[in-house]
Image (cartoon, helix red, strand yellow):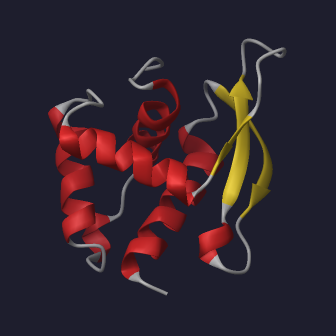
C-alpha cells in the first residue's frame, strides 16, 4: 500500500471518529481490511431528511485537491497542514488533526467550510 493511500485512509478515520461529528451524523463506517475500501456515510445532523453521502478515499482526495489548488477556501494553518502532509506522507509529525480532516471533508462535499 502506498503512503498516499494510507494518508487518505487516515483522514477517513480521523474525520469519522471525531472531525465531522459536530455537524454530521456518521453511519456505515468501514475501516477494516484494505484501506482503499475505507468509507463512511454522512448526513446533516440538523436535518434528518437530508440525503446521506458516502465519503470514500476519492472524496478525501477531491477535498485535498481543492484545498491545494485554492478553490477550497480554508485558513492558512489548514492549507499548510494539508500541503505538508501530502508532500511528506511518511513523516509522523505530518498527521492531520480532526479539524483539518473535517475541513477536507467539508470542502469536498460542500465546496467550502460551512460549519466552524
In this figure, what is the number of numbered marks? 0
**Residue 111: x and y, percent?**
42, 26
- Which quarter shows the C terminus? top left
Q: Is residue 101 above or below residue 73?
A: below
Residue at 73% across, 80% down? 33
**Residue 7: x and y, percent?**
42, 68
Q: Is residue 3 above or below residue 21?
A: below
Residue at 38% across, 73% down? 4
Res 46 → quadrant: top right
Nearer the observer, 77 or 48: 48
Nearer the observer, 18 or 44: 44
Residue 6 in the figure: left or right of residue 49: left
Nearer the observer, 87 or 13: 87
Res 78 → quadrant: top left
Residue 85 in the figure: left or right of residue 48: left
Res 29 → quadrant: bottom right
Q: Is residue 54 above or below residue 91?
A: above
Residue at 35% across, 63% down? 95
**Residue 93: x and y, percent?**
26, 69
Residue 73 in the figure: left or right of residue 46: left
Residue 47 in the figure: left or right of residue 5: right
**Residue 89: x and y, percent?**
30, 73
Amino acid at each position: 500500500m502506498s503512503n498516499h493511500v494510507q494518508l487518505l485512509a487516515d483522514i477517513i478515520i480521523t474525520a469519522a471518529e471525531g472531525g465531522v461529528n459536530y455537524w454530521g451524523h456518521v453511519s456505515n463506517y468501514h475501516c477494516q481490511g484494505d484501506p482503499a475500501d475505507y468509507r463512511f456515510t454522512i448526513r446533516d445532523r440538523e436535518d434528518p431528511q437530508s440525503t446521506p453521502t458516502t465519503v470514500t478515499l476519492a472524496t478525501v482526495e477531491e477535498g485535498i485537491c481543492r484545498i491545494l489548488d485554492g478553490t477550497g477556501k480554508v485558513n492558512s494553518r489548514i492549507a499548510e497542514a494539508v500541503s505538508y502532509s501530502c508532500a511528506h506522507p511518511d513523516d509522523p509529525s505530518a498527521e492531520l488533526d480532526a479539524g483539518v480532516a473535517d475541513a477536507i471533508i467539508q470542502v469536498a462535499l460542500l465546496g467550502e467550510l460551512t460549519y466552524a
